[in-house]
Amino acid sequence: MNHHDHRQQAYELVKEFCETVLQAGCREVDFYKLLWVADWGVEAFGAEKVRAMLEKILEESVEYSDTPERLRDRLFRQPTSDTEAWFDRAMKV
C-alpha cells in the first residue's frame, strides 16, 4: 500500500464515523485528532481492523469526546511482532 492509499482510507473511516456521531446529535469528536490516530492505525494494522474498532466504540459509548484516545489505546494493545511479546514480559517484571 502506498502512502496516499492508507491516508485516504483513514480519512474515509474518520469521516464516516464523525458523520454517524453527528447524526446522533453529538458534536464532541475532534476530527483531526481522530484522523491522526486512525492514519497510524490503518498504516500499521489495516483499514478493516480500524473500522472494526471504531464500530465497537460506537456500540459501547454515548460519550464520544474521548474517541481518539480510546482508539489509540485499543491499537496499542494489538500485537505487532515478537518484539511486543518481549516488551510485555519485560514490563511485567
Image (spheres, rainbow, N blue to C red):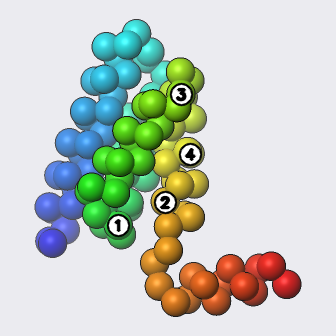
Q: Residue 73 location, x and y as percent?
A: 57, 54
Q: Quadrant of the N terminus?
A: bottom left
Instruction: Give the structural element (helix, strand or loop) at label 2.
Output: helix
Residue 69 is marked as 4
Q: Nearer the viewer, residue 64 or 48?
A: 48
Distance Cα–Cα, label 3 vs label 2: 17 Å
- Sequence order check, earlier mark of 1 and 4: 1
Residue 19's image quarter? top left
Name the residue located 46 percent from the left edge and 78 percent from the top edge: 80
Distance Cα–Cα, label 4 vs label 3: 13 Å
Name the residue located 56 percent from the left edge and 45 percent from the top edge: 69
Amino acid carrying mark 3 in the image: Ser
Q: Which residue is mark 2?
A: 75
Answer whether labels 4 and 2 touch (C-beta < 8 Å): no
- Sequence order check, earlier mark of 4 and 2: 4
Distance Cα–Cα, label 3 vs label 1: 23 Å
Amino acid carrying mark 2 in the image: Leu
Answer whether labels 3 and 1 touch (C-beta < 8 Å): no
Question: Is residue 77 rendered to the left or right of residue 93?
Answer: left
Residue 61 is marked as 3
Asked if residue 42 can be seen in this view, the reply is yes
Answer whether labels 2 and 1 touch (C-beta < 8 Å): yes
Distance Cα–Cα, label 1 vs label 4: 17 Å
Q: Is residue 35 above or below residue 89?
A: above
